[in-house]
């Protein structure tokens, strides 16, 4: 049982480049989330999707877009990467009160 | 609105000593409260959660937490620290709909031999 799978695990981008972070869950959960983790700031919600076909902004959505492709997949896109987006990104899915997290994507923008 | 405050970004204890990690929350609705643990270069793993019922909640690895509504607190404790407990711990709050989780800034636990 894979749980929540994120790809890639590591990525280095140049300022202005674009990329998409992929997330897939095999637990048939309706809700999925994207968080970024920065030192001393905990996890901050970027976007979430309560169900297939719906997405909503979180605390820090600027500079990001998301797509809930189907029930399994929730992708995060950086259209024009900036150094301020250097962070560790976590995808999560939820059933009831419990959230399950992926292993994270460590993104560096130079 | 909901928020979480974790007191102490770093806590250091000796092996065998009591672990106490502090978490206070604010919530305009009845809160659901969580503690997650993160080991280096890994995702977050649920330690324990409070939703309803008994206010003393037991989790994995010998950890427990008590929901105190009057103090708006949900502190995490373990009677005897083990070297393997060294990790970062996050407190989180959510409302009844669980649409959003709000995380504290985290506490790094160091366990000294």
Image (cartoon, coloured by chain):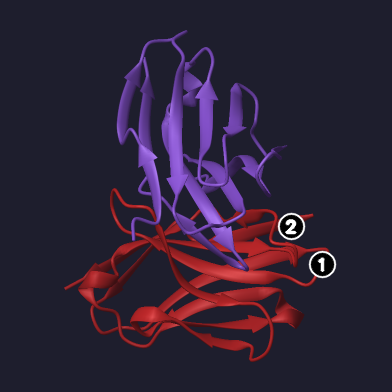
For the N terminus of chain A, the quadrant is bottom left
Instruction: Give x and y (percent) for residue B99.
Output: 70, 55
Q: Chain of mark 2?
A: B
Q: Which mark is residue B2?
A: 2
Q: Residues within 10 Å of mark 2 (few under 14, many from 20)?
A: some
Q: Secondary structure at mark 1?
A: loop
Instruction: Give x and y (percent) for residue B102.
Output: 63, 54
The answer to whether residue B24 is above or below residue A11 is: below
Q: A105 left or right of A53? A: left
- Could you confirm whether marks 1 and 2 are on the same chain? yes
Q: Chain of mark 1?
A: B
Instruction: Give x and y (percent) for residue A98.
Output: 55, 66
The answer to whether residue A42 is above or below residue A66 is: below
Which residue occupies the extreme top position in the image?
A16
Q: Which mark is residue B29?
A: 1
- State yes or no: discs 1 and 2 in contact (Cβ < 8 Å): yes
Q: Residues within 10 Å of mark 1 (few under 14, many from 20)?
A: few
Please indicate, yes or no, whether residue A39 appears anywhere in the rendered image: no
Chain depicted in red? B
**Dot 1 or dot 2, earlier in sequence:** 2
For the C terminus of chain A, the quadrant is top left
Instruction: Give x and y (percent) for residue A65.
Output: 61, 25
Which residue occupies the extreme right position in the image?
B28
Please indicate, yes or no, whether residue B36 appears anywhere in the rendered image: yes
Name the residue rendered at 64%, 91% in the picture.
B54
Name the residue rendered at 69%, 83% in the picture.
B52
Give the colour of chain A: purple
Which residue occupies the extreme left position in the image?
B113
The answer to whether residue B112 is above or below residue A87 is: below
Q: Secondary structure at mark 2?
A: strand
What is the spatial separation of the Cα atoms under label 1 and label 2, in whole angstroms? 8 Å
């Amino acid at each position: 049982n894979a749980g929540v799978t994120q790809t890639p695990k590591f990525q280095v981008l140049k300022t202005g480049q674009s990329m998409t972070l992929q997330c897939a869950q095999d637990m048939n959960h309706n809700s999925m989330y994207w968080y970024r983790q920065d030192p001393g700031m905990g996890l901050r919600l970027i976007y979430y999707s309560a169900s297939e076909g719906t997405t909503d902004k979180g605390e820090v959505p600027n500079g990001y877009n998301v797509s809930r492709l189907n029930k399994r997949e929730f992708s995060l896109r950086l259209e024009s990467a900036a150094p301020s987006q250097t962070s560790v990104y976590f995808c999560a899915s939820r059933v009831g009160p419990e959230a399950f997290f992926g292993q994270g994507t460590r993104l560096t923008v130079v | 609105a909901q928020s979480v405050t974790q007191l102490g970004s770093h806590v250091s204890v000796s092996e065998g000593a009591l672990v106490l990690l502090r978490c206070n929350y604010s919530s305009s609705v009845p809160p659901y409260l969580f503690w997650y643990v993160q080991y280096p270069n890994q995702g977050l793993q649920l330690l324990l959660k409070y939703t309803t019922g008994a206010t003393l909640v037991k989790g994995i690895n010998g950890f427990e937490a008590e929901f105190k509504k009057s103090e708006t607190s949900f502190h995490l404790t373990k009677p005897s620290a083990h070297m393997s407990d060294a990790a970062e711990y996050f407190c989180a709050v959510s409302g009844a709909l669980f649409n959003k989780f709000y995380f504290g800034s985290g506490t790094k636990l160091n366990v000294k031999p």
